[in-house]
Amino acid sequence: MWHTDSNEFYFGQWFKGRIYEHVSDLSPSGKRLIYRAETHRGPYKQWTAISRPPFITALTLWAGGGAWGGGGIFDSETRIRLNHGSSKSKPEDGFAVPPGVQVSTYDEWTNPKKQWPLQLTLFQRNEWAIQQAEVAAYSKGGRRAWKIETPEIRWKRRGKWILESSVVRYGGPGEPGTVRHFRMLDDDGDCRLDLGECDWADWSYDGRLLFARDGCVFDAPVSKARGPGGANERLDLRAMKFEAIASPEEARRWTGEVVGRRIK
């Protein structure tokens, strides 16, 4: 977890599986996370949970989600829309939602013409404009695969500067599901900073450019008049190895302060 106001990082837990970040969301305070996860092991195999970052131990949990369901969105600290359809608003046995927290259904869940409609809602809420991709199916080793004919492009403006993200390909083994290329453009559409392939990039609340690439986390100042400056490496994660980490007792309660182990 990155506290961008102080540039402090806190370590939480590893996860042996897939977390679908594009249908996951932080609460406005950043104190709770709703996420879609999948392992195809154990009692649930795929599920949506709410946790206290940087930990992913479930405070409450809904099993399933299907091919295009799962995940959710925080409309406020106490109002959550769950992407599971109207029949799955009740958590699994042994889990509950605290009094005062309202869980409703995400309205677009049953629309069969949209893949990951929640992702589009989250993009729009987070001020990203989007040109959706056009893809085509083909046979690869006797199995159905997909290729990008027109890439998905997203862009997000801060003043005269535009952060652009484009999907260049679907990832292979050891890569994200989609591989993205990021760059910063000016008002005329000219590239002022090419970040190449990154895991993630976005604007910070104070106008800096934040991004992660090749196992490292960076930020770069952006002048309102002159544009981006040189990037600063804030954290190198490449030497880290898996640890089985139990969450502290505080991370298993809905309220309270949880920060994890500070690593920088």
Image: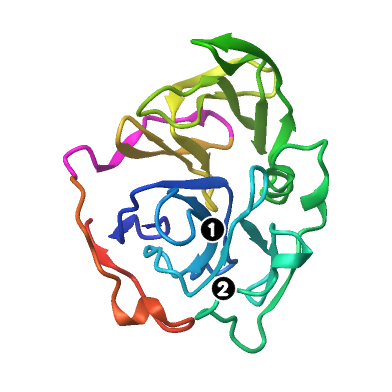
Q: Amino acid at mark 2?
A: Glu
Colour treatment of the image: rainbow
Disc 1 target residue: 47
Residue at the image point whose x is 70% and y is 70% from the top: 89
**Mark 2–mark 1 distance (CA, rounded to whole Å):** 10 Å
As drawn, is 67 to the left or to the right of 7? right
Label 2 CA crowd tier, 10 Å (few <14, some 14–19, many 20+) = few
Q: Which residues are magenta?
A: 225-240
As drawn, 69 above or below 158 = below
Query: Residue 109: x and y, percent?
Result: 77, 52
Amino acid type assigned to the residue bearing label 1 in the image: Trp
104 or 100: nearer the viewer: 104
Question: Is residue 209 depicted above or below 94 in this figure?
Answer: above
| Crowd rating for badge 1 (residues with CA inside 10 Å; few <14, some 14–19, many 20+) | many
- Give the structural element (helix, strand or loop) at label 2: loop
The percent position of residue 75, horizontal first and vertical second, equals 70, 66
Instruction: Please say if 25 is above or below 197.
Output: below
- Mark 2 or 1, nearer chain start: 1
Instruction: Give me the residue at 35% from left, 29% from top.
Output: 174
Which residue is under mark 2?
Answer: 92
The answer to if 76 sits in the magenta stretch is no
Q: In this image, 43 relative to 10: left or right?
A: right
How far across and down, in percent of the image, does residue 223 sit? 52, 36
Relative to 20, is 127 on the left or the right? right
Camera-side residue of 150 and 219: 150
Asked if marks 2 and 1 touch (Cβ < 8 Å), the reply is: yes
- Quadrant where the N terminus is found in the figure: bottom left
Instruction: State the image coordinates of residue 10 (x, y, percent, origin top left).
Output: 30, 61
